[in-house]
């Protein structure tokens, strides 16, 4: 369970390791009531180093139990990113009477001349991920020419009755298939001439989603993270494609260069979705690493470094006649709310007065007002710092401005303003803002535009205020909830 601490910027409702370095989420799988999170971990330092898989589990997507390291480097190299699945039908032959977990990950080895070799390997667990056995036939998949050949994400494809692996291959992704997780056959390669190639392709994911909740209108979503390149001040970020997939080939809906970003902030990278969520739940749940390779090794925390975003549900919805990927905070977060303010049809002057009495660090704001009005909140404000979150209705834009948010001198591109285009079509602005000790996550227009940014104010910066050019502005609704990992059942809506 996360410890509540008022120092060192540790979020109270975000996952961070108790100590040392963390990057990508790995092996996210649901099994026997537990959501597993493995993660890229350097257990001996607070900067990136020889990669292990750290491990934590949660039953509610907010409170975590950290478990011993799951996978450590071996004769084939470090343990890079990958995925985990439940082998329900024992296709791998690893299990006896009961299904268990199989992890499919990249072994990264530096050979004599420092030339890296990346190959795919397996490990399995018969005790709900507590202990792991590496497969003696490792590695199971290598490539003769790709130097960057990593981050396998595997899922069961019912139509072809095979496992599918999507894996990053330099500037493309490759799709493989297998009957048993051990023997892999290449199906196709995707990515040449489409999407962003501003950095190396990493950590892909591929999954089907119903369009507007209609199962007969299924589309496939591909996530592809792209690494940081000094030529781009955005650093590392994640793009997505929609299309069709038949078990071997992904055909995108649009053969164009228009890049669709998952998140318009700087700090949501290498995110993928959970495997094996039960059909009766039916959600596609996602979590990303809340940092950026541009400055991940320099952020100002001490005993640990790295946090995950909140868990989010992904859906495909038609907005302004286009099918787009929508993100909403996982509903489990609502159990951890304590209502601080709950107003309907409140004028901005009334709201301003009430906000001036509040001092909050970890909370959610849920606000609605007319779509043609601009509104700006100042959050985590104190003597020296404030983070601005607003909607500019004239520019159809939502933004986080962290120019004065706190400590930022550790990288020249950290401080700044990040905006996303809004396409409001129901006459109302809807904004949900999640604030914690060192992060802000904004979901605008009911999940259409998302911005995730780290911030490093001091713990004394707890003020909240609001502004609008229109002194007669009315919030049709405004709720503020304190969010804390201590459950407050009965107190949420
Ligand atoms: C993405 C990444 C992966 C790799 C891992 C190494 O952030 O670069 O491609 O497997 O991190 O830690």
Image (spheres, grey):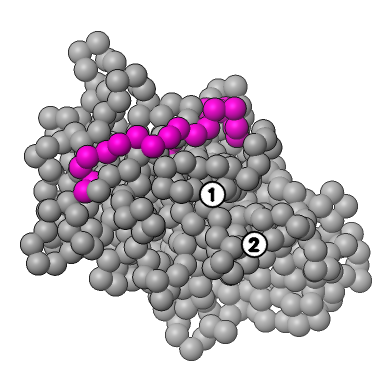
Q: CA distance from mark 2 to mark 1?
A: 16 Å
In the picture, measured across the screen, residue 266 lies left or right of residue 366, that is left
Q: Residue at x 75, y 57 (%)?
A: 321
**Extreme residue in the top direction:** 113
Name the spot of residue 365 as percent of width and height, x first.
64, 68
Residue under label 2: 317
Q: Residue at x 39, y 57 (%)?
A: 159
Name the spot of residue 391 as percent of width and height, x first.
77, 56
Instruction: Specify start and end residues of the magenta stretch as a single range.
Output: 180-203
Element at badge 1?
A: strand
Mark 1: give few (<14), some (14-19) or many (20+) Cα within 10 Å. some
The foreground one among 40 and 272 is: 272
Image quadrant containing the C terminus: bottom right
Element at badge 2?
A: strand
In the picture, measured across the screen, residue 126 lies left or right of residue 320, that is left
Name the spot of residue 433 as percent of width and height, x first.
63, 62
The foreground one among 141 and 236 is: 141
- Can the viewer see residue 490? yes
Q: Residue at x 11, y 48 (%)?
A: 133
Name the spot of residue 420 as percent of width and height, x first.
71, 48
Image quadrant containing the N terminus: bottom left
393 falls in the magenta region: no
Q: Is mark 1 within 8 Å of ligand 1?
A: no
Residue under label 1: 244
Q: Earlier in the sequence, mark 2 or mark 1?
A: 1
Quarter of the view holding residue 109: top left
């Amino acid at each position: 369970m996360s410890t509540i601490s008022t120092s060192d910027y540790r979020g109270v409702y975000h996952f961070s390791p108790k100590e040392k370095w963390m990057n990508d989420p790995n092996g996210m799988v649901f099994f026997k009531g537990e959501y597993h999170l493995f993660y890229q971990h350097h257990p001996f330092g607070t900067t990136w180093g020889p990669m292990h898989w750290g491990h934590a589990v949660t039953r509610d997507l907010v409170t975590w139990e950290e478990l011993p390291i799951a996978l450590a480097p071996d004769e084939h190299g470090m343990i890079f990113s990958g995925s985990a699945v439940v082998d329900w039908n024992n296709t791998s032959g690893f299990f006896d009477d009961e299904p268990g977990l199989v992890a499919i990950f990249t072994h990264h080895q530096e050979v004599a001349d420092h030339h890296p070799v990346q190959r795919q390997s397996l490990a399995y667990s018969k005790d709900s991920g507590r202990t792991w056995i590496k497969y003696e036939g490792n590695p199971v998949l290598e490539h003769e020419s790709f130097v960057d050949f990593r981050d396998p994400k595997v899922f069961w494809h019912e139509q072809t009755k095979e496992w599918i692996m999507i894996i990053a291959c330099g500037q493309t992704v490759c799709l493989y298939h297998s009957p048993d997780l051990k023997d892999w056959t290449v199906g196709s390669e995707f990515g040449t001439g489409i999407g962003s190639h501003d950095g190396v392709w990493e950590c892909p994911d591929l999954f089907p989603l119903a369009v507007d909740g209609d199962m007969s209108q299924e589309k496939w979503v591909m996530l592809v993270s792209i690494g940081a390149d000094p030529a781009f001040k955005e650093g590392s970020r994640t793009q997505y494609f929609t299309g069709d997939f038949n078990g071997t080939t992904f055909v995108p809906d649009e053969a164009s260069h228009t890049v669709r970003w998952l998140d318009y902030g700087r700090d949501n990278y290498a995110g993928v979705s959970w495997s094996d969520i039960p059909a009766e739940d039916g959600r596609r749940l996602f979590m990303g690493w809340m940092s950026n390779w541009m400055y991940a090794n320099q952020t100002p925390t001490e005993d640990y470094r790295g946090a995950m975003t909140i868990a989010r549900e992904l859906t495909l919805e038609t907005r302004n006649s286009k099918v787009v990927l929508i993100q909403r905070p996982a509903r489990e977060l609502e159990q951890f709310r304590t209502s601080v303010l709950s107003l309907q049809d409140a004028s901005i002057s009334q709201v301003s007065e009430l906000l001036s009495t509040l001092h909050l660090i970890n909370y959610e704001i849920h606000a609605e007002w007319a779509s043609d009005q601009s509104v700006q909140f100042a959050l985590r404000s104190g003597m020296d710092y404030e983070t601005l979150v607003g909607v500019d209705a004239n520019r159809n834009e939502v933004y986080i401005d962290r120019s004065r948010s706190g400590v930022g001198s550790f990288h020249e591109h950290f401080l700044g303003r990040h905006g996303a285009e809004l396409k409001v079509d129901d006459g109302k602005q809807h904004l949900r803002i999640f604030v914690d000790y060192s992060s802000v996550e904004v979901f605008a227009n009911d999940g259409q535009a998302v911005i995730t940014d780290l911030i490093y104010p001091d713990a004394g910066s707890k003020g909240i205020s609001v502004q609008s050019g229109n002194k007669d502005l009315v919030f049709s609704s405004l709720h503020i909830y304190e969010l804390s990992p201590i459950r407050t059942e009965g107190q949420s809506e």
